[in-house]
Image (tube, helix red, strand yellow):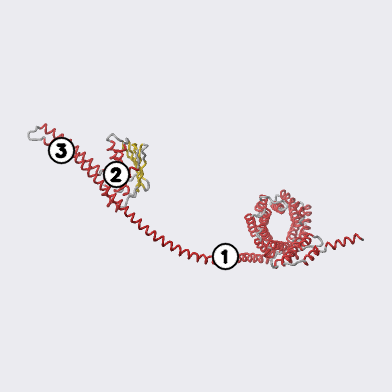
Amino acid sequence: MRCLFFLLLLSLLSFDGSSQSFEVLLDSALSSQNNDATYFSEARKKIETNNDSLNFLFTKIKHSYRNKVSDSTLYYGAQFLKHSGIDNVPEKCFLICRWIGRTYLDLGVYEESLAYSQQGLDWAKKADDINAVAYQLADIAIIYHEFKDFKKGIEYGKVCFNTAVEGGADSMHKAICLNAIGINFDDWNKPDSALFYHFKIFELDPVPDSLDIKFTFNNIGNTLMKMQRYVQAEQYLLISLKWARKIDSPYNYAGSFTNLGQLKTKQKDFRQAKIYFDSALHYALVSQSLEKIRDTYFDLYTFNKERGDLSQAIYYQDKFYVLKDSIFKTERLKTVSELETKYQTSIKDNQILEQNTELMEREAQFNRAVIVAVFLIVLIGMLVIILWLNKSRFKKKQELLEKELEIQLQEASIQAALSSQELERKRFAQDLHDGMGQLISSLRLLLGNINSNSSMESRIEVVSKSEKVIDEMQKEIRGIAFNLMPQTLIQYGLVPALKEMALRITSSGQVNVSVISFDIPKRLPEIQEISLYRIIQEWVNNVLKYGQAPKIEIQLVGHENELSITIEDTGKGFDTGVLELGSGNGWRNILSRVKLIHGELEIDSHPNRSGTTLIIRVPLEGVPEEQQAEKLKNTL
């Protein structure tokens, strides 16, 4: 009697919540098997704040969902989501929406399940929990699987996996996404794709714990069975059953036993199949999942039809259609479509609201920026004006300097041209005086020896000697004419004239001059031919005079738009700076002529090594015709 009294007193004390805190009472209510109602009653009395109220409702819903009390889960879940202050606990809101959505899914009320899953997705995003986001997207993919809208289910499954990968979700939640894709492919009769996504779970890094992905083994076994790979299928289904036993999940038990029953039916092992299906129906009823019960009824109908028990087949067929009609109606497909549209519209509305807010902020920033910009523009404008005035002054000074420089260059060019002409005249006069003058004097003396008394033999001798003098005079005249303007240049062009000049120089026996040409037009513009001939002639004369070169090579190469002339000699090198400082007109004449034909000039020489190279590049299109007439006379 005393012992009974003591136990009764202990029992009363254990339910006395006055000395227990609010949080302890909620923990006790959640963990208690028999006295949960008492703990919840005591906890309700201690609610003082809004947070206490939310915590109470959250624990109540969690307890109801865990114990498969659908009505309480839905009722308290709705109360929680209507409560004020839930914006502060988005991490609890998405769990509430998940539990409500899963409860409606078990009851076969898919449109409500989808609505709450989408709402849970929004809360998961607000909580910035990538694992929760992935879980909600996977739930949506599974709901579409139940509607037989496999394409939509795969679409959400792939969005789920990509979001999980990009956001850094853990392996288990990535596996949940891959599972959602796989089961949609499986029931869409695409087993190869289903297996691809199921086996992809085992490629995750790290691979999730087998207990967390127990569904994968069952799904792989189911797909292999549809592919008639029965031995492999049974191995995976037995592994699935082993994990179901470990977690003691009626839902998972039902799924594993159902698939094993289907497998044995296909193998015509009806005795073992019946054992599996009896277990499957028992655990489906215990799970209280209408979706699982419905599927089990259909499998029992198929099993009994296969083994020839038509009365049992009709019995389970009727049960299947009754349950199917109660949870899956045509109107619901339309409702779900409307919910999807409404959900997408709400997303767009939120985006528009965010964009409008952003636009208003941008407009305010723009107005501030305009004021600053106007000030800066005025300031910059003033600086630009100052800079422009300074630049104008500088430009005028530059123009004056350039004009002065141009005048100096023109004067230098004219002076060089006049000096060149004067030099040519002196040379021409000297050639006439020294050559032709002496020959004429010799001819005069010879002819003076002829008189009336001269014998025929003396007259013939005078005529013979006079003919030789006349031949010398002719050669002299040709030489003078060649120096003034070679007829070969006028008649046949630049290359033949250069070869004739090279032959004349080589015939002296002191130096070997060669001319090589590649792809040169037969004729160039007259101004180019004359200018290039004079440039080469002047340079060769300088080499003969100062370089003491035994060999000179002139190479002309034609390109698409350019003529390249290279003059190489084997004589003494020199300091190229001497050319700029020299007092002679030869180098200035060369520069003047190169400039006239818009060419470029380059010299490679050094006093410490032998050999000099002159390179001249001239555009093949020539120079403008109006410049030729004006400047041609200065090149002669």
Q: Position of residue 403 (x, y in %)?
A: 32, 55
Instruction: Point out which mark residue 402 bears.
Output: none
Q: Residues within 10 Å of mark 3 (few under 14, many from 20)?
A: few
Q: Tag 3: residue type?
A: Ser
Q: Tag 1: residue type?
A: Glu
| Frontmost residue, 110 versus 363 | 363
Check disc 2 and report its element: helix, strand or loop: loop
Check disc 3 and report its element: helix, strand or loop: helix
Q: Position of residue 559 (x, y in %)?
A: 37, 46
| Frontmost residue, 537 versus 231 | 537
The residue labelled by disc 2 is 583
Q: Residue furthest left?
A: 453
| Frontmost residue, 112 versus 442 | 442
Q: Mark 3 to mark 2: distance in Å?
A: 38 Å
The residue labelled by disc 3 is 441
Q: Residues within 10 Å of mark 1 (few under 14, many from 20)?
A: few
Q: Tag 2: residue type?
A: Ser
Q: Mark 3 to mark 1: distance in Å?
A: 109 Å
Q: Say whether residue 202 is left or right of residue 283.
A: left
The residue labelled by disc 1 is 358
Can residue 314 be seen here? no
Q: Quadrant of residue 496?
A: top left
Q: Residue furthest right?
A: 1
* In front: label 3 or label 2: 2
Earlier residue among tags 3 and 1: 1
Do the CB atoms of the residues marked 1 and 2 lie less than 8 Å apart?
no
Earlier residue among tags 3 and 2: 3
Q: Say whether residue 615 is left or right of residue 25.
A: left
Q: Quadrant of residue 122?
A: bottom right
Can residue 274 be seen here? yes
Q: Position of residue 192 (x, y in %)?
A: 65, 52
Question: Which quadrant is the N terminus positioned in?
Answer: bottom right
